[in-house]
Image: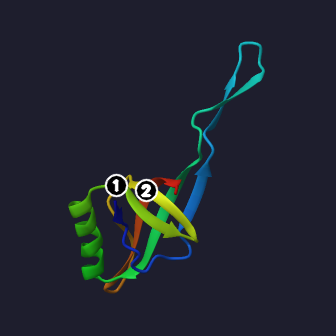
Amino acid sequence: MAAYPTTFISRESGIVPDAGIRTEIADDGTLIFRRDRAVPAYGLEILHEWLSQAEFDALLAFVDTNGYGPHTLTLHGINFSLTLVNLPQMVERKGSKYNVVSKAVAVRV
């Protein structure tokens, strides 16, 4: 399992836990709660701040070489095993630097 590149990962990167609890409404109008999985999953939005073109190309090359996952990453002090759900995407440009976002689903390890 390859380690996801940590090039300029921002403290603004997000972790959204999903306990897998789903709600349904029964025929009589009461709420029914159902757990889809035994452990929580996490949605990660990994923000790489102000990368050069070469650093952005290296992120894309990482995905080309290692695939979408699974990969390991420590984010905000939590160890994850993650699978990317998109290629790293430029979301903002300032001169020759880019903010780049990768989105992933993950579990804690």
Q: Position of residue 68 (x, y in %)?
A: 31, 55
Residue type pointed to by label 1: Gly
Give the quarter of the image for residue 48.
Answer: bottom left
Residue at position x 77%, y 13% in the image: 28
Q: Position of residue 33 (x, y in %)?
A: 70, 29
Name of the residue lying farthest toward the top: 27
Q: CA distance from mark 2 to mark 1?
A: 6 Å
- Using residue 40 as the reference point, say whether residue 46 is left or right of it: left
Residue at position x 63%, y 44% in the image: 19
Report the quarter where the N terminus lies.
Answer: bottom left
Give me the disc on residue 17.
none
- Whether 19 is drawn above or below 4: the answer is above
Secondary element at image label 2: strand
Which of these two is toward me, 78 or 27? Answer: 78
Q: Position of residue 94 (x, y in %)?
A: 38, 83
Residue at position x 26%, y 60% in the image: 66
- Whether 5 is drawn above or below 86: the answer is below
Give the quarter of the image for residue 12.
Answer: bottom right
Secondary element at image label 1: loop
Q: Earlier in the sequence, mark 2 or mark 1?
A: 1
Residue at position x 35%, y 55% in the image: 86
Q: How many marks?
A: 2
Give the quarter of the image for residue 52.
Answer: bottom left
Residue type pointed to by label 2: Leu
Local crowd size for mark 2, using a 10 Å CA cut-off: few (<14), some (14–19), many (≥20): many
Local crowd size for mark 1, using a 10 Å CA cut-off: few (<14), some (14–19), many (≥20): some
What residue sits right under mark 2 in the picture?
82
Which of these two is toward me, 70 or 102? Answer: 70
Q: Circles 2 and 1: CB distance less than 8 Å? A: yes
Which of these two is toward me, 40 or 32? Answer: 40
Which of these two is toward me, 61 or 77? Answer: 77
Give me the disc on residue 69.
1
